[in-house]
Image (cartoon, helix red, strand yellow):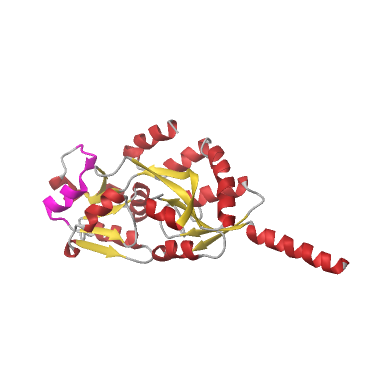
Amino acid sequence: MFKFLVIIFFLLLGFESVAKTVTFLKVDFAPYYILDGVHKGRGRDEAIIDLLKQSLPDHSFQQILIPSSRALFELQHSKKTTCMLSLYKTEQRKQQFYFSEQYSTIGLAPTVAMHKDIAEKIIPKGVTTTSLKDLIFKNDLLLGKSTERSYGQHVDRIILKIPQDDMIVRAGKDSLQSLTYMLLKKRVDVIIGYPGEHLYLQSKLKKESQFIQLQISESPKTVLGFIGCNKSKESKQFLKKADMSLSKIKASPEYASLMLRWVPKNLQQNLVNKLNNQ
């Protein structure tokens, strides 16, 4: 009888350990996750996961790299407690995932990057914001984008109206890096991404001076990303604790520094204002 109780005790401990293990999915989107180079492991979202890990010592954290094109499918269908940072909280996604109440990251909305030689011909000097719709359709430009990415509902609607012949879509690892190289070589006119991504990849090529970033008038100035997890009882319990941790993390100077680390200086003020008012 004693042996039986001991076995049950250790089985229960094992189940509790599994229940308190959280797997975070990582994707190849630098600088949110930096997989190589001098900044390896120091991506923005990686740092937030580390802060959550420090604040929730009763949970075991795992991180798994997965192709971005499969990330949401794996997140939805995982049998274990699995989460992902910086997800848009849309009505459709709320049917598929549980979300944190607190946002996990805040950043500038998507921007377009252009080669300065092309931008100087069609963008008035001093302009920092442009209409994506006008930019593409009125100037007959070729747009480059990564596959399976959302840029917000308003921008997504514009992209859906662009003829396939006027767009280059890249899939797989380093898709935006490939598009940035094409932009440098003027094989594509405009690429869309997030400000930190553009800045990181341009600095990696050591060609920042040859590019310009413009905010998109059809987008809000800032966007919020939430923790999204697969729909399970354990995920819901984890998110309640994560919300309490996030409220403290976001009040720290370290959080503001992380959010601003890869934002171009000429675009930082919009994010600073939002961080100061959170």
In percent of width and height, residue 268 lies at: 36, 37
Residue 143 placement: quadrant = bottom left
Give the residue displayed 54% in from the left and 42% down from the top.
246
Residue 175 placement: quadrant = bottom left
Of the pair 203 and 35, the residue shown nearer to us: 35
Give the residue displayed 47% in from the left and 39% down from the top.
257
In percent of width and height, residue 107 lies at: 39, 43
Of the pair 166 and 232, the residue shown nearer to us: 232
- Residue 101 is left or right of residue 15, and the answer is left
In percent of width and height, residue 56 lies at: 62, 48
Residue 135 is inside the magenta segment: yes
Give the residue displayed 51% in from the left and 35% down from the top.
253
- The quarter in which the N terminus is drawn is bottom right
- The quarter in which the C terminus is drawn is top left
How many marks on residues? Answer: 0
Of the pair 210 and 252, the residue shown nearer to us: 252
Q: Which residues are magenta?
A: 126-141
In percent of width and height, residue 235 lies at: 56, 55
Quick check: 273 above or below 219?
above
Residue 11, visible in the rendered structure = yes
